[in-house]
Image (cartoon, rainbow, N blue to C red):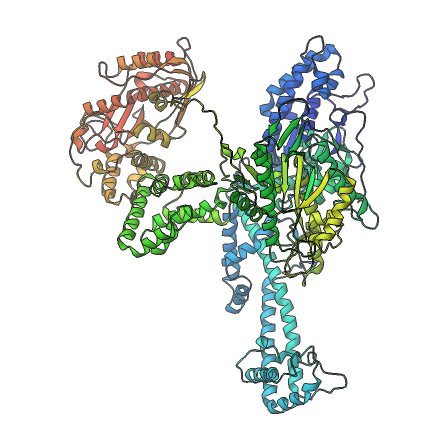
Amino acid sequence: MTTLPSTESSSTPLALGLPLRGSQLIEASAGTGKTFTIALLYVRLVLGHGQPDDDSHSFTNGFTMPLVPPDILVVTFTEAASQELKDRIRARLVQAAEAFRATEGDDGLHQNDPLLAQLRDDYPRAHWPLCARRLEVAAEWMDDAAISTIHSWAQRMLKEHAFDSGKLFHQEIVKDLSSLTQEAVFDYWRTRIYPMDAPMAGVMMELFASPIALHGALRTLLQRHDVQLCFAGAPLPKKDLEVQLRGLLTDREALNEAEDKARHAYCQDAEAIHQALHTLRPKLNGKRFTGKNDDATFAIWLEELDAWGQGKRCLAACKFVPKLATSQLLVNKGTTLPPFEIHEALEAWHELSTSLHTQAKELKPLVLADAREWVSNRVNKQLSQRAEMGFDGMIQGLADALSGKGGDALAHRLRTQFPVAMIDEFQDTDPAQYRIFDAIYQVQENDPSSALILIGDPKQAIYGFRGGDIYTYLKARAATYPRHHTLATNFRSSTNVVASVNQLFRHAETTFTRKAFRFANETTQENPMPFTPAGANGRKEALVLNSKPAAALTAWWVGEDDEPVNKKRYLAQAARHCANQIASWLNDAASNASGFENTTGQAFRPLQASDIAILVRDRIEAAAIRSALSERQLASVYLSDRDSVFATPEAKDCWRWLKAIAHPESVSTLRAALATPTLGMSLAQLDELHHNELAWEATQERFAEYRARWHRQGVLPALRQLMHDYRVPEQLLAKPQGERCLTNLLHLAEWAQQASDTLDGDQALIRVLGEHIQDPKRDEQILRLESDADLIQVVTIFKSKGLEYPIVALPFIATFKEISGKWGTPLFHDESGNAFLELANSKDEAKEGFEAANDERLSEDMRLLYVALTRARHATFIGLAALKHGRSKQAQIDKSGIGYLLGGGKVLPDLGSIKSAWQVHSEACLHITSHPATSEEVSYQVQATNPELKTARTPSHPAFTPWWIASYSALQQKGVNAPETPQAEIETEEHQPIRTAFIQGTPEVGSLHAFPKGPNPGTFLHGVLETLANEGFDNASRDPELTQRMLQRCAQRGWEAHAPALKAGITAWLHTPLAAEGEEGPVLASLTHYRAEPDFWFATVNAKTPVLDKLVKETLFPGEPRPALGFQQLNGLMKGFIDLLAEHNGQYYVIDWKSNWLGPSEVAYTQDALARAALDKRYDMQLCIYLLALHRHLRQTLPDYDYDHHIGGAMLVFLRGIQAPSRGVLRVKPPLAFIERLDDLMAGENHKEVAV
């Protein structure tokens, strides 16, 4: 690799001078305005800025033609980043359009936005209106802009170019493949291990006790499926696993035979061997036979030899006996070994044992390699059969398509579709992603007919654990040479902060042989990742701490000069000092001694807690600093890169609660739930329950009631009741972090309610929650509170990338995690940049691989350190100590990023040597300083505040919006948003009882009248009818198993006693004509043309509900009282869900199921009672809306449509009254004149045709 210089022009800003053709690389250091540059480049592409000169037809620095948003591909790596880019680009297009719309005279643009002014000046004034129009059109077109994550874009391309890519037109995206992967591992276990004979299966069980253990070992290998596997530094050979197992078992048998032979040889000469050993004792090698001169030790050796000879011990468990092998029996020079057969026999055993040990070590990697290939193929096959795709599958699928048979044609189509592409955060790319863009744009060829602009900062490549590969970036850097450009002016930090960071890294770059970021060749000094000092734009405000100007970079000395500290002590001392400093700053802020002075004359702003960020590596460090802050009454919030609500302590507590609710009879389970910290019971209360039998029984009954509520109403009401009974909110809100804990609990309760809708039974929900806790996913992000923004921010360094804070503290910057084989699988690259995963378990087995992995780990720590040191606007504080690990007597800080930055890899044995290295920087830069960490505790003096009270909000219905989506339920509830699902509409309609007084009495047990009432039972009954329809009413009437399934669902909800009534109801619903006695009506089991749960949408234009209501009241049941609809203006869409749309004898019916309870017997379901119930709930309006939707639909789809002939009417079927003379059916069919008038009103009076 070679050092690749920048070619950025010094006269023209990069955003205006970058060639918009061929392949270009922009390296954007921290805080240098990368997003700002991308937005301005986008504006240039839309304008066609720098096109070929019309006269000479020669290229300047622009693309060949103006482009529109769908032509310009902009790719980044997160949804949030892509949305931010889209918003920023849209805003920039609008700003540019306004600039080009400016009239004569100075509009202040040159002062306020000099780059945009310079861009405008490149065009004659006569062209400004055309430029403005192009920019305005582009801004309006941004909804169709090709700005997305790389995964979303790859998915879209596979779908749009399905023929060329060889993929299906539609594949579902599976966000989490862990369940499918675990299932595949279990299949591997069943397929590969179960058929083995007992000895072979035993060997496999020695390596992996269970499929779960195998799955854990495979996790990293499956995530990095593109990486080669190696063992002891060599690529893993392709060997047949069963052959290796057979060979191992054969050698084991030979080893046992060799041991038997050696034992036999000993038994033949046991007494003589003992005498010979006594004679040989003084001449035994002292290092090999430590303790030979100790009589007790020697006696133990001989006892071991006898025990082995008698078969009481196996040779592998002996320590002394194996040393009697010929090669192991070391004696002084000139000593002749006694001529016993045992020595040669033990030597044969030793050689076989050594060989067998080597085979056993090699077997585990072979099993992992075999399992990885099998499981990967199985998962891919399962995904293909299900028409599904994982996130990695999107990238790999497109990369494979571009490298396959039709790859050239696909690349040409994509290049034509997106002539220009900008790849943001390119330093985090992986090999497959780069192959995609290289195949499309031919990076090294630098084709001027297209443009590929790679934007990133290799110094911030810190996401290797996600698959980001810095070596891929370096490959692209070499391919784009010499078309390299830099953004070198820092707009984030103060001049002093920029100077201090420059000092640290420039010193490393010019002093150490491997340079600042450790990629330089020590022999040739070629450096593909050089550090270039950044310039500073500066800031208008300055930081003052404790009445003094704050230094840009301060080191806190933790520990004593001559005594290294272990990690535990380092974390504790650094956390205490950091918390003390913050408390001191915030105390002084009350008297304006800490805060921000503005050079433009604005008022002094006192320092606030939210101005401070503490950057950490992981949760352990976060817990240490948050504990120290809490001790000083300082509130903080932890923001990690994996903010999953399932990773919180509240998730475990909630899981224990659910287990106890599901099994209140289990003493241990209930005790575990009661002892959870979140429940807040004292030890005295728990002890009282342990000794008071009545109190314990009452607690069990309480949890049994929670279980009943869970079954009756859902898990969310049950959890809320538990929290209410045990005063959880009151207790939590009295604690410093109580608001966060309570929010997490409520979030988990809501998640549980949603998850239970798709799970069968209590145990399924408990199991799934447990799985989420074991392996937290990022789908359920912690809900952020408004108050979080006012607290001290404790953030992982990974999460902080791209963010900025006024003050940054790095109290634990000296920590590091050396790769030792105890955790993770070492990953390293060879000289060509090829990645390998080392499967050896220790450094002893693969010294070079572990050293290479640790070398890369240190290089990534340097990049992580650069990210951490470039987050601050005004000041950074770091905690430095002579940190040691294990039993080491000297510091090992040289293995950390900050240690390398100070010493270049040299050992810094104590704090004194670290201070000396730091002094080099403090003498070279006035803005770098240090002082000892103090242990004297400083308490934060909480300032009493009287915040201005805002006017109390009064409950009100959502404000009217000119365009909205209405429904019958929305009209009934005065304009609330339309329900999203049929279930929601059912709950909205039937959540209140009918107000009209009906017949009183007790329902007959075993009848539908005794079936539970309310929205949940109503939803259940609707679900039964929907299932019957989907299975086919005719089939359902002849399938007892289907009915049985419905009864099982009923029992699962705790309604076992009502199963006979439900069974009778299903039979009646299927076979009873839907009409009053003596009248003809459709029978569900006889229907052949119908559809369950169709939804409809039709347009409404300024229709006023009072007018509609008056029309319905005059037509349906005229003169009958009913609630009036509140005023609403329907302008937008009318939405609804029809339970059943059916055709019977050439007529079409709208059928709506109603589970309302009208009374305890069939007597309550007369036609008058049905009408009264319908009017009370305004079902009359619902039926009219549904009929209008059907009328509009048939009018457009039936050639000879006639309302009187084709419309059968609309029916309300009260399910509980199916055996009454009325059959529970209320049927209406208003005249055609009514429907046409209603149609006109919905269409805005004058519109006759409005599409459904």
Nearest the eye: 355 or 523: 523
Q: Position of residue 375 (x, y in %)?
A: 55, 52
Which quadrant would residue 992 be assigned to in this image? Answer: top left
Residue 952 seen by the camera:
yes
Residue 428 seen by the camera:
no
Q: Position of residue 842 (x, y in %)?
A: 65, 61
If the image is split into quadrants, where does the N terminus sit?
top right
Which quadrant would residue 2 be assigned to in this image? Answer: top right
Lateral position of residue 958 relative to residue 129, left or right: left
Nearest the eye: 922 or 1220: 922
Nearest the eye: 610 or 149: 610
If the image is split into quadrants, where does the C terminus sit?
top left
Number of numbered discs = 0
Q: Residue at x 49, y 36 (%)?
A: 783
Q: Is residue 445 above or below residue 886?
A: above
Q: Position of residue 442 (x, y in %)?
A: 73, 36
Lateral position of residue 291 relative to residue 479, left or right: left
Q: Is residue 324 above or below residue 1096?
A: below
Q: Is residue 834 above or below residue 733?
A: below
Nearest the eye: 179 or 490: 490
Q: Residue at x 62, y 31 (%)?
A: 595
Which quadrant would residue 96 be assigned to in this image? Answer: top right
Q: Position of residue 439 (x, y in %)?
A: 70, 37
